[in-house]
Image: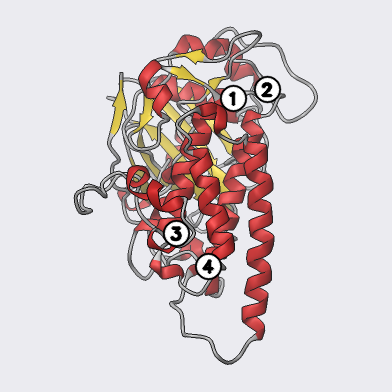
Amino acid sequence: MSDGWESSTRVSADVNDISRSSSKSSSSSVPPTPRSEEEILQSSNLKSFSYADLKMATRNFRPDSVLGEGGFGSVFKGWIDENSFAASKPGTGMVIAVKKLNLESFQGHKEWLAEVNYLGQFYHPHLVKLIGYCLEDEHRILVYEFMPRGSLENHLFRRGSYFQPLSWNLRIKVALDAAKGLAFLHSAETKVIYRDFKTSNILLDTNYTAKLSDFGLAKDGPTGDKSHVSTRVMGTYGYAAPEYLATGHLTARSDIYSFGVVLLEMLSGRRAVDKNRPSGEHNLVEWAKPFLTNKRKIFRILDSRLEGQYSLDVAYKAANLALRCLSTDPKFRPSMDEVVKELDQFNDSSKEMANTLGNQTTGLRHRRRSAGDLPKVNVVSAVAYPRPSASPLFTK
């Protein structure tokens, strides 16, 4: 999902991998391993919607209800009754995001099944909630909770009155939320590799709580004595770990590299790959790395829109964390639990600084308004999101 409601075109995981995937949840009871598509659907705690219900909920999938588009298909805004989940009139009941498979999508069914398999059994405050699905004739549809503020990608990179630049404090908060979601997936009880961690897959609710979405490429981690999972290389260019690109060997440390890329995007306000930048600055990681090790040069990579909102000490520590996540040797990357611990400390420090600045009335330079300064608005009724831009993807 992008805008966050649709991610860009990509190829899905193999259906056999999905069918073998363990059925896991955050509760202590672990159901048996599903062996078939039928068992995956039966073992999930999801609502099975009829196509007619979702057609009514989205007003016949009207074009003006589109939240985003991508390789999987389109995502529509809809409304259902909070208790019965029956379709309701627009503006009443619970708002939902309805992801409808493009019938020409070659890999769509496999991704659809992967999402049902994982999100149908995981419950965590930093994973987007999958409410249900529709499997009827040729139709493949997923129904999610609606995330009113869209994707982190839009808030970092889109310009305009609707998308205010995120404040330093909000960026640290969002990074911490996303890290907690990834740490949950990597935990001993879950052992899942997300494989597609990027800004367009991090969605924000009304309070800027971040949740991971789009589990079409997720895979179970290695078991027993195995150190990695061997798989075809898939993902989004600019975010994938170098050892995964070179060998196809997938580990949780691959996700941690991707997290480092996203953290760097949040610190710099630059995209992971941007061909519109001057020569030598197209690849964010390659351009920024030399500056991340020097406290005197760190300001060169920091988003100028954040001026006056952070302490240099915390900014340097955040940059150093990103650098460690981006280590060429995966053994030197921190675990996601370690990342969460450090971001928690940055979050506390940033809040303290914000309180200090708030209590000062003189001697401060005027700084640009950002999303953390804005009053709360009814974002459900706000202007429709612009369509997401496609990101280049690769497969091998």
Residue 57 appears in the picture as rendered = no
Q: Which amino acid does the dot numbered 1 rest on?
A: Val
**Quadrant of the snapshot with the C terminus:** top left
Camera-side mark, 4 or 1: 1
Circle number at residue 49: none
CB contact under 8 Å: marks 2 and 1: yes
How far is the residue under mark 3 from the one under mark 2?
42 Å
Q: Residue at x 62, y 34 (%)?
A: 335
Query: Number of labelled discs?
Result: 4
Mark earlier in primary sequence (4, 2): 2
Q: Position of residue 88 (x, y in %)?
A: 54, 49
| In front of the other: 192 or 91 | 192
* Residue where numbered disc 1 is placed: 192
How far is the residue under mark 3 from the one under mark 4?
37 Å
Circle number at residue 378: 4
* Residue where numbered disc 3 is placed: 298
What element does badge 2 sit on? loop
What element does badge 4 sit on? loop
| 231 lies above or below 136 | above
* Residue where numbered disc 2 is placed: 24
User: How is the rendered protein coloured?
Assistant: secondary structure
Q: Residue at x 23, y 53 (%)?
A: 277
Q: Which amino acid does the dot numbered 4 rest on?
A: Asn
Mark earlier in primary sequence (4, 1): 1
